Amino acid sequence: MQKKIRMLAGYAGLECLWEVLPEARLVGGCVRDLLAGREVHDMDLAVPCVPEETMRLLGEAGIRTIPTGLDHGTVTAVMDHRPYEITTLRRDVETDGRHAVVAWTDDWQEDAERRDFTINALSLDRNGQLYDYFGGQQDLKDGRVRFVGQARKRIEEDALRALRFFRFQARYGKGAPDSEACMAVRECRALVRFLSIERVVSELFKILEGPQLWDIMVLMEETGLLEEILPHASLSSLRRLLDCQDPPHALSRLFALDSDPDLGTYFRLSRLQCHVLKAYGQKEPALVAEAMDDELRRLRFRQDLPVLMARSWLRQAEEVGQPSPSWSRFRERLAAQDQPVFPLTGRDGLACGLVAGPELGRWLKEVQAWWLEQGCRPEKEACLDWLRARIALRSQNS
């Protein structure tokens, strides 16, 4: 285990923290992924001392600290531009299904008891000693995602754990899911209604971009949780998209599940995400797998490439619902196509004798429409020639 610890990125910083906080242990996801042989991203630690004491000890050692969540016992140490979250051991005093009131403790098992799954309740000290109070190491080997203690009680403490169960089942589960967990999710599914929509969406997006999505969505539907989150979800549309072997993008998969144009607003997504979701539902500009080069240039001008790419997967799912060489070539050609830039500006129109204001805007739109008809190929001089000719012709006729 010591060898595995030394393989951690930023080990020198971790060793320095252990010199200051010798009782600290690695906890949670970093221990789980270290045991599973997966890449470790965030290194979180727990300590038996109160957060103020943690900050004092780190400060005396010259280590920069940030009080990121003192109410929950968390401070962040920054070393070599890498953050380490250090949290005081806690026990739950009160829970309401959304938030918990905590108190400090020096009992490591008591802290582990408040964690969601056995595979997340592991801890590891600086000597490589693994502490496993609930059989998490064996569960990790067996691919079993199991709640610490009674599944129903854990979900009642924080209903988001129902969604987290599916996310972890997708990433670490093997075979049939834990029956007690599934029953608890089914019985407590209505509790997700009281969670903030932001927390729900964050977990949902992680599921949508994760592995085993189809099996997880079927399981969510069977437990009734999917209907609580997306009452109008269409698994058949998602199945067709997944059969196309689409890239794991949460927004396009969400659209496949539920194409309601108001979904972005309901989920309180960013303005950009709402715009993208609505763009997915637009019929124009139309996408055709065998589009000519001129049409590809027009597409690139009218919409951003990531939106076009996602729309092409959704169109492929709707049209064929399976891998398609023609749609693959379409995306390759689209990505290789340079972004067209309309060559004229308002200053060019003024130089042609046009007056600033609505008239100038109308003339530029006319030139742009002609330029698009020509497949975005005419360069600046050709556009100016066309504009001058049209201005002259209109002057003659007026």
Image (spheres, rainbow, N blue to C red):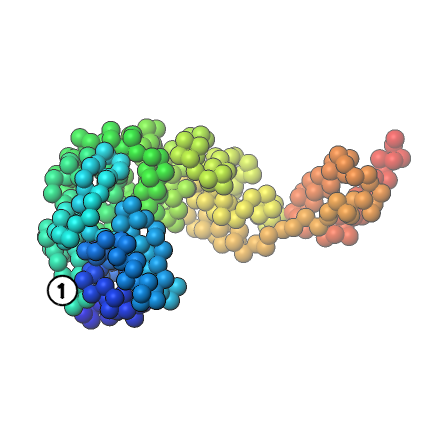
Q: Residue at x 28, y 42 (%)?
A: 214
**Residue 37, image x, y percentages:** 22, 62
Residue 194 vertical position relative to residue 6 in the rendered view, above or below: above
Residue at far right of view: 396
Quadrant occupied by the N terminus: bottom left
Mark 1: give few (<14), some (14-19) or many (20+) Cα within 10 Å.
Answer: few
Quadrant occupied by the C terminus: top right
Label 1: which residue? 129
- Can residue 372 be seen? yes
Depth check: give the residue in front, 46 or 356: 46
> Which quarter of the figure has residue 350?
top right
**Residue 144, image x, y percentages:** 15, 49
Residue 165 vertical position relative to residue 282 in the rendered view, above or below: below
**Residue 21, image x, y percentages:** 23, 63
Depth check: give the residue in front, 166 or 192: 192
Q: Residue at x 44, y 30 (%)?
A: 262
Judged left or right of residue 341, residue 179 is left
Residue 127 vertical position relative to residue 92 in the rendered view, above or below: below
- Can residue 292 be seen? no
> Which quarter of the figure has residue 22?
bottom left
Q: Residue at x 56, y 39 (%)?
A: 285
Judged left or right of residue 244, residue 73 is left
Q: Residue at x 12, y 39 (%)?
A: 150
Q: Amino acid at mark 1?
A: Gln
Say which element carries label 1. loop
**Residue 129, image x, y percentages:** 13, 64
Judged left or right of residue 184, residue 390 is right
